[in-house]
Amino acid sequence: MIIASKLQPENAIERKTVAAGDYSLNLIKAGQVVRIVDLEGNQAADTLFYNANNPSERYSATDTLREQGNLYLTAGSQLRSNDNNVMLEIVADTCGRHDTIGGACATESNTVRYDLEKRCMHACRDSWMLAIAEHPEYGIAKRDISHNINFFMNVPVTPEGGLTFEDGISAPGKYVELQAKMDIVMLVSNCPQLNNPCNGYNPTAIEWLAWDA
Ligand SMILES: [Zn+2]
């Protein structure tokens, strides 16, 4: 569902560009709104959310999909935790659909899906592990790295129930906007994947902006 935001970038309290292949780890207070922007189009933003006061409570794809009765995330989707609490709600979306089934890339899956020699290529899971190692203050451990959202990534479910990574439906400047329902830690890997079309074979920068309630 396409819903544009009325929030103006000049009123944002924070604005950060995340280079291709880099990560972003930051706090979003309850009530604040965060917008993630696909600056150049067809760039997957592999994202995890945590309860800032208890990181063992985290985004859960299974709880989210079961409660909303739909496989895709878009405006109106309530992102739920493993305790079935609403963590964030998508309040605007100009892309129209986001994946939470495909998972994040890892060096291990790259070897299975593509080739043994892809083992050494940079992957989202590496970026997440680097993020939590460089920022122990958030209290997030390896065991908390779980199922994620792939903002802007196109993983259609076929009528037969199959999953494929397809060329993107996003475009330059498309964005998704979320309002936090609790204090949140947001961990984004700006996906470095080069072996499938999730980044158009050309990873590019994204940015995020935050507004006070
Ligand atoms: Zn990735």
Image (cartoon, rainbow, N blue to C red):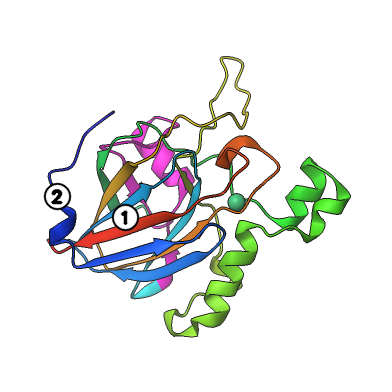
Residue at the far right in the pictured view = 116
- Residue drawn 85% across the image and 45% down it: 115
| Distance between the alpha carbons at the discs numbered 1 and 2 | 26 Å
- Label at residue 23: none
Q: Which image quarter is the N terminus in?
A: top left
Q: Is residue 2 magenta?
A: no
Q: Residues within 10 Å of mark 1 (few under 14, many from 20)?
A: some
Residue 194 at x, y percent in the picture: 67, 46
Mark 1 lies within 8 Å of ligand 1 (Cβ measured):
no
Of residues 95 and 102, the one nearer the viewer is: 95
Q: Is residue 77 magenta?
A: yes
Residue 144 at x, y percent in the picture: 54, 67
Three-letter code for the amino acid on which mark 2 is drawn: Leu
Of residues 165 and 65, the one nearer the viewer is: 165
Mark 2 lies within 8 Å of ligand 1 (Cβ measured):
no
Three-letter code for the amino acid on which mark 1 is drawn: Asn
Residue 41 at x, y percent in the picture: 44, 39
Residue 33 at x, y percent in the picture: 21, 57
| Residue occupied by mark 2 | 7
Occupied quadrant, residue 142 = bottom right
User: Which is more N-terminal, label 2 or label 1?
Assistant: 2
All told, the count of numbered labels is 2
Q: Residues within 10 Å of mark 2 (few under 14, many from 20)?
A: some
- Residue drawn 43% across the image and 56% down it: 82
Of marks 1 and 2, the one in the foreground = 2
- Label at residue 85: 1
| First to last magenta residue range | 55-83
Determine whether the residue tagged by mark 1 lies in a helix, strand or loop: loop
Determine whether the residue tagged by mark 2 lies in a helix, strand or loop: loop
Give the answer, above or below, for where 107 lies relative to 43.
below
Give the answer, above or below, for where 191 lies relative to 17.
above
